């Protein structure tokens, strides 16, 4: 094929890609079914290769690169590709055929494709015959997600990819005396890497190792190839490591030691004033060279404040712009506790937010948006929050890598609801690194300790939630509608904060249509009027900006902003929710709940949690409705019966909750102080 014909064909493929992408089908408000795009593209490539073969011509590197780009885009799964078994088989056969015309080196050098998927594609090509184990080893790095000191040792925890070489590959840590430290491997299913076909490209395997913290020690990771030859592995430091891959002169100081990373080795030195000053001088110099000199000042202030700090410092908060959850309840309890505290503690919230107005009666409130907050964050000993998003344990956003050597706090997760679903894929230790999780029920406790979260019994405490202490039952003939958010509805997040921006596309979702229709349903409104009920619809805090989309009426009002949960739980007579844990607070007071789960399969296949041992139909505290009509009928039925809880659900409540003594705050504070 001439160069001119080749580029004409390449241009045609590119044009086809652009046109096809515009015809992506939509289901329930989010993009799916791009399979037609890939099928058509792979078929066109197949036709092209047959033409080239018939003419006994070669496939150019540019065309090979183009084909690999599409194969790579397809192989790595996302929620936008939905296909039948027949479509999957055709795609698999087409890709296998295309790979025969793609050189191994082209697969190797596809930059956008993660290593596990390159290995998978090479196995598709020829069963792995062209796969070089040494090539993999040269590209392997140990992922040290967590690296910190604990007592007399350095604790390292991360993910292993040595299975890409061979499941029996030997990997360990060796010190400067040639002493070996074996890695303790464990299953970390939350990090499984699947292909679009559902095959596992890489099994999630975590590792942990403890290394003696002693002056002069040097440690390096070693992998042994199939010929018995040892290879030194470099380390890629993760977000909870106090060393960083972003700075060459990375180090951190803790207690009597300074820990550094030099020449692919972790080195330990005795801490002296001179070694500390020299290390920080080199670090600051490199920060300035990297254009991060603006961080030098706050680092220096934090170092000196930490040295002369007389008491430990705790930072407590709910969301950046809203309080009213377990953190505020605990904070108020701490203030009202007469016994002296041997630590300083502050509540953080954005002073420009409406949530701040609910906290102005309290002392020691720090502005989340201020440099003072960042300084306190760097010298804090404990971060205590009802949230576990990234902004909770990282106050510096994209600058984290340049200051996380100073992140020496313990993170206590108060929770903002009972974890009745399996949230291990979102909350795994290697994603959150929580020092203590507080559980409310025995079922929740065991689901975490016996599940795949990566936390042991020493990190989970059964205490109850602080906000349960304030629950009061004073029903006012109000129906509250409180659905949770949806991950499959993609709305841009404000970086470093808990708020999300407004989305015009939100009104096109099935989620919006369901709830907007529900709160305006003639049958429900007629029955509420007849029985003297009013109602309130509350958007989830992550969808707060979308409240303007919902249409209220003379019976059901759409609340502006986030709910005052204490008021809602106290005054409402009936709760209509879906998968939200607000059912726990409400049921705790023996009030009726109706679950609406019209999108159950989609929710659990795309959300941050998967369905766990708690089955709403079998274990929940009210009837579960899976479509619009049954939801309407059940709400009307409960209204007709003046929102009386059914006996079966009251018995479930009695059996489920561990504590009903209103002493949760005390148990929580005792547990945190003992940590």
Image (cartoon, rainbow, N blue to C red):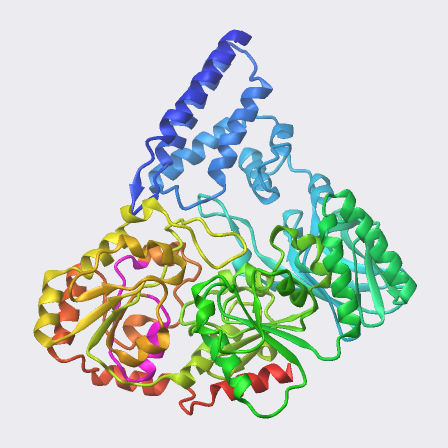
525 relative to 313, above or below: above
Q: Is residue 30 left or right of residue 665?
A: left
Image position, residue 566 (x, y; %): 36, 78
Residue 593 lies within the magenta run? yes
Q: Is residue 447 left or right of residue 551?
A: right
Is residue 45 visible in the rendered image? The answer is: yes
**Which quadrant would residue 306 be assigned to in this image?**
bottom right
Nearest the eye: 220 or 583: 583
624 relative to 476, above or below: above
Quarter containing the C terminus: bottom right
**Which quadrant would residue 500 be assigned to in this image?**
bottom left
Query: What residue range appears in magenta?
Result: 579-600
**Residue drawn 56% across the image and 65% down it:** 367
Residue 632 lies within the magenta run? no
**Residue drawn 49% across the image and 36% down it:** 73
74 relative to 12, above or below: below
Nearest the eye: 607 or 292: 292
Image position, residue 670 (x, y; %): 58, 87
All told, the count of numbered labels is 0
Q: Is residue 176 left or right of residue 330?
A: right
Image position, residue 201 (x, y; %): 54, 47
97 relative to 316, above or below: above
Is residue 264 visible in the rendered image? The answer is: no
Image position, residue 610 (x, y; %): 41, 62
**Which quadrant would residue 44 be assigned to in this image?**
top left
């Amino acid at each position: 094929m001439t160069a001119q014909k080749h580029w004409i064909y390449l241009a045609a493929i590119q044009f086809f890609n652009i046109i096809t992408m515009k015809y992506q089908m939509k289901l329930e408000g989010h993009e799916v079914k791009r399979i037609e795009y890939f099928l058509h593209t792979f078929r066109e490539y197949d036709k092209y290769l047959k033409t080239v073969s018939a003419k006994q011509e070669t496939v150019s590197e540019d065309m090979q690169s183009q084909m690999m780009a599409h194969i790579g885009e397809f192989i790595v799964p996302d929620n936008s590709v939905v296909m039948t078994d027949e479509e999957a088989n055709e795609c698999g056969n087409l890709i296998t055929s295309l790979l025969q015309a793609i050189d191994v080196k082209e697969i190797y050098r596809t930059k956008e494709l993660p290593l596990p998927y390159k290995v998978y594609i090479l196995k598709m090509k020829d069963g792995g015959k062209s796969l070089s184990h040494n090539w993999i080893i040269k590209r392997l790095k140990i992922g040290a997600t967590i690296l910190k000191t604990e007592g007399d040792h350095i604790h390292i925890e991360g993910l292993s990819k040595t299975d890409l070489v061979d499941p029996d590959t030997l990997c360990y840590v060796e010190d400067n005396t040639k002493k070996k430290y074996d890695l303790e491997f464990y299953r970390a299913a939350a990090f499984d890497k699947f292909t679009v076909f559902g095959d596992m490209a890489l099994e999630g395997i975590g590792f942990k190792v403890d290394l003696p913290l002693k002056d002069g020690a040097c440690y390096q990771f070693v992998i042994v190839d199939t010929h018995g030859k040892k290879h030194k592995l470099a380390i890629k430091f993760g977000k909870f490591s106090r060393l960083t891959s972003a700075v060459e002169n990375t180090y951190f100081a803790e207690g009597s030691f300074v820990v550094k990373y030099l020449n692919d080795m972790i080195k330990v030195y005795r801490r002296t004033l001179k070694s500390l000053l020299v290390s920080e001088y080199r670090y600051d110099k490199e920060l300035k060279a990297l254009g991060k000199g603006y961080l030098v000042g706050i680092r220096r202030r934090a170092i000196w404040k930490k040295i002369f700090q007389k008491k430990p410092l705790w930072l407590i908060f709910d969301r950046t712009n809203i309080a009213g959850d377990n953190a505020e309840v605990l904070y108020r309890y701490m203030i009202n506790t007469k016994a002296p505290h041997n630590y300083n503690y502050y509540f953080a919230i954005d002073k420009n937010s409406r949530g701040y107005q609910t906290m102005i009666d309290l002392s020691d409130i720090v502005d989340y948006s201020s440099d003072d907050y960042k300084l306190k964050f760097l010298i804090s000993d404990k971060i205590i929050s009802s949230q576990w998003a990234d902004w909770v344990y990282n106050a510096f956003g994209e600058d984290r890598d340049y200051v996380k050597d100073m992140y020496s706090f313990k993170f206590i997760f108060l929770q903002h609801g009972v974890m009745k679903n399996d949230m291990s894929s979102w909350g795994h230790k290697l994603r959150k690194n929580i020092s203590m999780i507080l559980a409310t029920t025995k079922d929740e406790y065991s689901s975490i300790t016996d599940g795949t979260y990566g936390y042991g019994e020493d990190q989970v405490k059964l205490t109850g939630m602080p906000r349960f202490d304030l629950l009061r039952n004073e029903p006012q003939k109000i129906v509250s509608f409180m659905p949770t958010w949806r991950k499959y509805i993609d709305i841009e997040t404000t970086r470093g904060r808990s708020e999300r921006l407004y989305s015009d596309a939100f009104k096109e979702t099935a989620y919006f249509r369901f709830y907007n229709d529900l709160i305006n349903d003639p049958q429900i409104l007629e029955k509420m009027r007849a029985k003297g009920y009013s109602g309130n619809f509350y958007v989830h805090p992550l969808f707060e900006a979308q409240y303007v989309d919902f249409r209220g009426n003379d019976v059901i009002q759409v609340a502006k902003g986030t709910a005052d949960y204490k008021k809602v739980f106290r005054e409402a007579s009936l709760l209509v929710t879906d998968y939200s844990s607000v059912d726990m607070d409400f049921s705790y007071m023996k009030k009726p709940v109706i679950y609406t789960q019209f999108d159950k399969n989609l929710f659990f296949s795309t959300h941050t949690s998967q369905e766990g041992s708690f089955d709403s139909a079998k274990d929940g505290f009210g009837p579960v409705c899976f479509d619009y009509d049954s939801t309407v009928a059940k709400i009307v039925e409960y209204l007709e019966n003046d929102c009386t809880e059914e006996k079966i659900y009251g018995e479930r409540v009695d059996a489920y909750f561990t504590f009903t003594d209103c002493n949760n705050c005390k148990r929580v504070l005792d547990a945190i102080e003992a940590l």
